[in-house]
Image: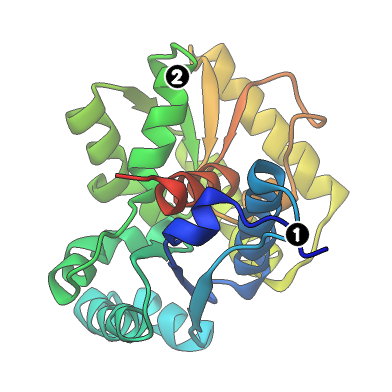
Amino acid sequence: MEPKASAYYTAGMKTIGLLGGMSWESTLLYYRTINEEIARRLGGFHSARLVMVSVDFEEIEQYQRRGDWDAAGTALADDAHTLQAAGADLVVLCTNTMHKVSETIERAIAIPLLHIADATADAIQDRGMKRVGLLGTAFTMEEDFYRGRLQDRRDLDVIVPGEPDRAIVHRVIFEELVHGTIREESRSEFVRIAEALRADGAEGVIEGCTEIGMLLDAGSTEVPLFDTTKIHATAAVELALATS
């Protein structure tokens, strides 16, 4: 007997466009999380309808290093347009930092870009929290494109570590996590930093880099954590299965 098709299959599940490779380590987590969530919700043999463009992160990292955000935005906008041409109904940019160029990407496409900060804000407010800590790259922690969106659009109070701890977080991301390297001494440092943010009044801590969840999870600390990779991927599933 053939398995019974779900309403989502017959009505047409939306196709998620993943713009990843920044790094591929976290993009792998997006792919897995999205498919696991589709399977959990729909059962049977269901998996996600996906198209993907995975960039060469070396190119993107060089743009970051030089501060050439216009070139980075143009490159990612072109890739997002490729996803649209391939049939994507929405775009998921699999990185926090590169949402710095989200407006450039949005101008290049006629389909929605699911902003990671908006999905994260929803998760925070669903928990009834107001003051949160933020860990991520130096760009994400120190510039306004991410913190400002949370504060101005969602009225959240966002705090970050002091400069020495911001440097530790940034270094671990770029020297270890994007290469898939997990070190216990780095985990201990991230726990210490997260707990320091809680001592400063944070009710929870945003893992504002898509690789941080590889290092720090709920089993590592009692501080409530917001894993942006899982949050963003799950929000993509919600949008893909929405009937209106």
Counting from the top left corner in percent of width and height, residue 164 is at: 53, 43
Image quarter in which the C terminus is found: top left
Identified at 72% across, 32% down, the residue is: 191
Q: Nearer the viewer, residue 176 or 76?
A: 76
Identified at 28% across, 74% down, the residue is: 67
The residue at which mark 2 appears reads as 126
Q: Which amino acid is tagged 2?
A: Asp
> Can residue 76 be spotted in the picture?
yes
Q: Which amino acid is tagged 1?
A: Pro
Counting from the top left corner in percent of width and height, residue 23 is at: 58, 72
Tell me the element at label 2: helix
Q: Nearer the viewer, residue 60 or 105?
A: 105
Quadrant assignment, res 204: top right
> Of all residues shown, which one is farthest toward the right?
184
Identified at 45% across, 24% down, the residue is: 124
Identified at 34% across, 66% down, the residue is: 89
Mark 2 residue crowding within 10 angstroms, few (<14) / some (14–19) / many (20+): few
Quadrant assignment, res 96: bottom left
Is residue 153 toward the left or the right of residue 162 in the image? Answer: left
Is residue 197 toward the left or the right of residue 184 in the image? Answer: left
